[in-house]
Image (spheres, grey):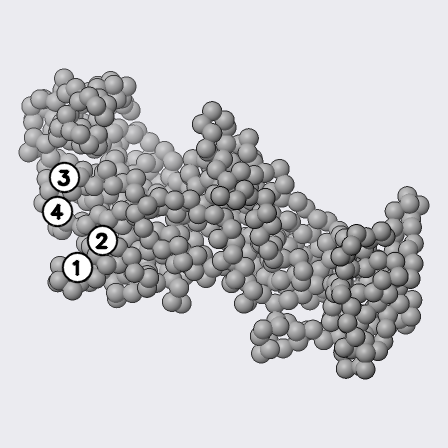
């Protein structure tokens, strides 16, 4: 594991851990990452993964992966498997794989303990009645008419709930705390609800399922977690976390600590909304490269190193903020700039014929695999009489400071020589079909004229040897920074219609065509691309744009 994945930067959580170890409060660090298996992980979850695993690694501790599988209506084993794959892809390995469902019997036994001690009761009100009696931030709630049921009656009803004698919603088990508490979470929260549905791990064994607040702290205690790291929305739940553990014979009392979530602009981070995007067909699945899911980012060509470095740079705080998408894009640019081999590809081809180049011959020119990494050597690039260049690299009547090809003008072909445009050939439709050019042989590398300078250098691909490719130009999924900002408008209205452009005319160097799924490149002068892990095949490449060479959105965004 590289250093950027550990919590080396000082932050308030790291300082707490250091104090706890130095004081002897804890002999080691035990953390957990507790996702619910009801969807795929996204870039925000990666922050929590890096924090939990990174802290434990730094201080020689351990981290459990624990699935919060307490809601069988929304959860599946497929999601669990995808989450495990994402955690491992990020570069982490858990000490133990746990599930909240592993503790269903213990959670039930602890709930019985609450009933016996008079701190929990069965409430037979409807969900609507319970909600209406909860009160507001300025008004206390009303006590349930069932709050003072006798202990034996509560025990009997709770056991019958477990046995499956009642329908969904007929009863719930609530903690008996304080309906006038200023913290709404302490107003007799529900601990168990009836769900007569099978669980993907326990089958039909259970008809009641614990609420998150009940399962979370007790699961932490049973696993010996020392530092239970949660995002800020759980700060108001901490008194309840502590209260539950104080009411039962828990083996230990973990410390819950909250930190700010990782939010990005130009996307949404809610699993509910991400699921909506998938189910309504606005994207092509959870691994669509426009999605902020780790599966989508992986397919787009993001690397685990870039994501770990991004969150290390962003740090840990207690203040919510929205991070500019450009910061994440710069993280992958910096990473791929170091690792991606260079190659040439033409997306919108215009044919160039070199009239003084021998017909049928191929010259193999040498080009650096990576200009800053000479140890990677050189690649052989085929050069022939007929070439493809980008259509945008030629203009018949160019403006000032257009330093690419024009009639009578010269440019250097990258890694080759200087060419001059002698004429234009039009097709039957009047459009430019090809350019007739000549090359200057003295401007090859090693020749007397190699140092002759022209203002423009363009990339190219041999028409004889180049391979056709499908190129998918992915961009940001939404066209506004915060698609959820306007409460009276549907966030789907702000989907960027140009978030995916498919180029079927692209031509790439022959070496690219044989690349493996997931192999990345820098297309010189264009951007960073990766072989699609599902659709790219040897000889029939499909390449996804990971990111442009520069931030193309910066000039579009208003300055503060």
Q: Are marks 2 and 1 in contact (CB under 8 Å)?
A: yes
Contact (Cβ within 8 Å) of mark 1 with mark 4: no
Mark toward the start of the polypeptide (1 vs 3): 1
Disc 2 crowd rating (10 Å Cα; few below 14, some 14-19, many 20+) is: many
Disc 2: which residue: 227
Q: In this view of the protein, which residue sits in the foreground, 428 or 102? A: 428
**Dot placed on the residue nearer the N-terminal end, 2 or 4:** 2
Q: CA distance from mark 2 to mark 4?
A: 16 Å
Label 1, label 4: how far apart the Cα atoms are:
20 Å
* Of marks 2 and 4, the one in the foreground: 2
Q: Quadrant of residue 248?
A: top left
461 to 190, vertically: above or below: below
Ranked by sequence position, the earlier of labels 2 and 3 is: 2
Q: Earlier in the sequence, mark 1 or mark 4?
A: 1
Residue visible at 47% across and 29% down in the picture: 486
- Nearest-to-viewer mark from 2 and 1: 1
Contact? badges 1 and 3 (CB < 8 Å): no
Q: Is residue 112 visible?
A: yes
**Which of 298/480 is in front?**
480
* Label 1 vs label 3, nearer the camera: 1
- Dot 1 surroundings within 10 Å: few (below 14), some, or many (20 or more)? some
How many angstroms separate mark 2 from mark 1 (CA)? 10 Å
Any mark on residue 250, and which? 4
Q: At which x and y percent is residue 356?
A: 91, 70
The label number, if any, that marks residue 271 in the structure image? none
The mark closer to the camera, 4 or 3, is 3
User: Mark 3, residues whose alpha carbon is within 10 Å: few (<14), some, or many (≥20)?
Assistant: some
- Above or below — where is 469 with respect to 178? below
N-terminal of the pair, mark 4 or mark 3, is: 3
């Amino acid at each position: 594991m590289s250093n950027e994945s550990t919590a080396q930067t000082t932050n308030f959580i790291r300082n707490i851990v250091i104090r706890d170890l130095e004081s002897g409060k804890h002999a080691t660090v035990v953390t957990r990452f507790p996702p619910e298996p009801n969807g795929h992980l996204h870039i925000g979850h990666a922050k929590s993964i890096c924090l939990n695993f990174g802290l434990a690694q730094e201080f020689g501790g351990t981290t459990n992966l624990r699935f919060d599988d307490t809601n069988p209506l929304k959860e599946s084993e497929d999601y669990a498997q995808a989450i495990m794959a994402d955690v491992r892809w990020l570069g982490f390995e858990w000490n133990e794989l746990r599930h909240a469902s592993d503790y269903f019997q213990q959670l039930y036994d602890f709930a019985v303990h609450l009933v016996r001690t008079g701190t929990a009761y069965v409430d037979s009100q409807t969900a609507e009645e319970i909600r209406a009696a909860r009160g507001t931030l300025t008004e206390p709630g009303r006590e349930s008419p069932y709050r003072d049921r006798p202990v034996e009656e509560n025990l009997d009803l709770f056991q019958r709930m477990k046995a499956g004698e009642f329908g969904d919603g007929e009863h719930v088990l609530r903690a008996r705390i304080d309906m006038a508490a200023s913290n709404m979470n302490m107003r007799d929260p529900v601990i168990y609800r009836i769900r007569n549905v099978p669980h993907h791990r326990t089958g039909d064994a259970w008809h009641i399922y614990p609420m998150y607040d009940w399962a979370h702290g007790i699961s932490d205690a049973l696993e010996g977690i020392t530092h239970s790291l949660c995002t800020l929305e759980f700060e108001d739940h901490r008194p309840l976390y502590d209260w539950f553990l104080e009411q039962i014979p828990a083996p230990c009392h973990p410390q819950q600590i909250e930190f700010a979530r990782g939010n990005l602009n130009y996307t949404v981070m809610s699993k509910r909304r991400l699921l909506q995007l998938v189910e309504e067909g606005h994207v092509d699945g959870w691994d669509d490269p426009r999605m902020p899911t780790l599966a989508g980012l992986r397919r787009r060509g993001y690397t685990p190193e870039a994501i770990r470095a991004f969150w290390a740079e962003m740090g840990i705080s207690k203040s919510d903020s929205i991070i500019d998408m450009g910061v994440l894009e710069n993280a992958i640019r910096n990473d791929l700039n170091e690792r991606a081999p260079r190659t040439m590809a033409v997306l919108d081809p215009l044919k160039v014929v070199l009239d003084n180049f021998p017909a049928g011959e191929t010259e193999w020119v040498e080009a650096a695999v990576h200009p800053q990494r000479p140890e990677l050597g050189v690649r052989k690039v085929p050069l022939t009489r007929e070439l493809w260049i980008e259509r945008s690299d030629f203009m018949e009547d160019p403006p000032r400071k257009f330093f690419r090809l024009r009639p009578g003008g010269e440019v250097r072909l990258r890694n080759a020589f200087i060419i001059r445009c002698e004429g234009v050939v039009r097709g039957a439709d009047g459009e430019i079909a090809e350019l007739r050019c000549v090359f200057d042989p003295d401007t090859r590398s090693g020749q007397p004229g190699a140092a002759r300078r022209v203002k423009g250098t363009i990339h190219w691909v041999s028409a004889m040897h180049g391979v056709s490719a499908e190129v998918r130009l992915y961009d940001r999924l939404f066209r506004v920074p915060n698609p959820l900002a306007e409460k009276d408008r549907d966030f789907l209205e702000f989907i960027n219609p140009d978030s995916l452009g498919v180029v079927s005319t692209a031509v790439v160097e022959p070496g690219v065509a044989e690349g493996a799924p997931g192999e990345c490149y820098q297309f010189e002068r264009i951007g960073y691309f990766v072989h699609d892990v599902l659709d790219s095949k040897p000889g029939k490449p499909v390449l996804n744009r990971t990111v442009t060479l520069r931030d193309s959105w910066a000039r579009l965004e208003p300055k503060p």
